[in-house]
Image (tube, coloured by chain):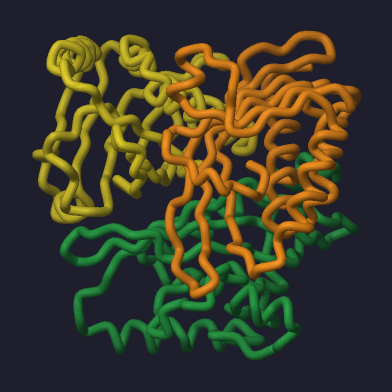
Chain colours: A yellow, B orange, C green
Amino acid sequence: MDTVSVREKIATFQAAYIRCIDSNQLEDWPDFFMPQCQYTVTTADNYRDGLPAGLIWANNRAMLQDRISALRHANIYERHSYRHIVGLPFVKSDQLGSVSAETPFMVARIMHDGVTDLFCTGVYYDDYDITGDVLHLKSRIVVCDSSRIDTLLAVPL
Amino acid sequence: MDTVSVREKIATFQAAYIRCIDSNQLEDWPDFFMPQCQYTVTTADNYRDGLPAGLIWANNRAMLQDRISALRHANIYERHSYRHIVGLPFVKSDQLGSVSAETPFMVARIMHDGVTDLFCTGVYYDDYDITGDVLHLKSRIVVCDSSRIDTLLAVPL
Amino acid sequence: MDTVSVREKIATFQAAYIRCIDSNQLEDWPDFFMPQCQYTVTTADNYRDGLPAGLIWANNRAMLQDRISALRHANIYERHSYRHIVGLPFVKSDQLGSVSAETPFMVARIMHDGVTDLFCTGVYYDDYDITGDVLHLKSRIVVCDSSRIDTLLAVPL
């Protein structure tokens, strides 16, 4: 399993991941993770200082499913839409059945009135389980560059 | 023809497509399409509601060529420039000689005075004809996230 | 050496290059270049008019190292952070051991108070030395779309 082919697999995974979110198929989002997994959204400042508390924290898939359920029930108002663009993945280490990678991203937010702004930028720090061509996240730490992430942050990153 | 290699071909195609536009070689743009093709630019709202009318609509390559001619004659004023960034393509289906894919994009607009803003985000919904390593668009539906796309929209998306 | 595989190598290179910058490992940045190399940052207007003078100009790796040293000593204030997103590389020519490519990019700037804006867009015009799987830049001309690039531009592009 050479680096190039793993990079391609991760690129394919990332494309599917953000498509799931931006096309509002949120119920499928937890399936990108292992049943036992770490999912954290934090800021660059907190991450650099080693602070564990993030804006979002989950350590299994069921918590991710709960989050989507809550989101669906809360969103009685018309919501914004988001557009994720992921950059090219950087493969850090690649050992039998396990890969670490970093992938930068930008997210635009499109308000209901059509106004578009740059909502968020950052990096995905990922550990993947790879079985054949199938990837699942063992851990995703979403490190947002800005400390001013909207605390009403609803859609997954 | 496996999915990974098709994804790579589409990535190569997308890179060439946006380079053609952003480097202002617009006369080459129609050649990315089949002679009989569908090209539509629409909004996410219209697309979701199944409304066929878009901001731009063409069903053959000659219409795309006409559009570029009109654009060249109309642009007596100094125009803005644009910068497209496409994300990683997601291959939906891959059958003999025919592929469907979705690719997200962001477009920045750079005004003549240098001011840069996020002009547009969205997704390319594409059907490709693949002959060997050569891809042509049978259909491209450009779905813009915002309903407030500038109606003076000139440059192709 | 086919185009697809070269494109993949360049994508891998670009991912590593921007990761080096955005993770503030600037001392490693000159190693992406050959000892004798051209590095220029300029504007689209200047580039189109054939003007050699850019915002930044260097013709060997030692000058790049000097630039980083200067940057480290100057930055006694808390600096902004940046987030690069590179698009899909377009391979222009591919000859034995030497490749030309164009890769578009966007850079977001995150101010210390968390405000995020679109700082810069443009294209990398690159010539690579390829030895096996190892790439080094023989020449990188960074052409920024806007003429209003911040003259305090500090971090490499």
Q: Nearer the viewer, residue A143 or C119?
A: C119
Residue in the picture at 17% in, 23% down: A58
Q: Position of residue B4 (x, y in %)?
A: 68, 24
Horizontal placement of B94 versus A122: left or right?
right
Asked if residue A141 is positioned above or below residue C127 in the image, the reply reads above
Does residue A137 appear in this view?
yes
Q: Nearer the viewer, residue B94 or B38?
A: B38
Image quarter hosting the N terminus of chain C: top right
Q: Position of residue C68 (x, y in %)?
A: 43, 81
Horizontal placement of B128 versus A2: left or right?
right
Residue in the picture at 42% in, 85% down: C151
Does residue A101 appear in this view?
no
Q: Position of residue A125 (x, y in %)?
A: 34, 40
Q: Position of residue A107 (x, y in %)?
A: 37, 41
Asked if residue A110 is positioned above or below residue B141 in the image, the reply reads below
Quadrant housing residue C32: bottom right
Residue in the picture at 43% in, 23% down: B45
Quadrant housing residue B66: top right
Q: Nearer the viewer, residue A77 or A69?
A: A77
Asked if residue B126 is positioned above or below residue B76 in the image, the reply reads above
Horizontal placement of B144 versus C115: left or right?
right
Residue in the picture at 13% in, 37% down: A55
Exactly how many numbered labels are in the figure? Answer: 0
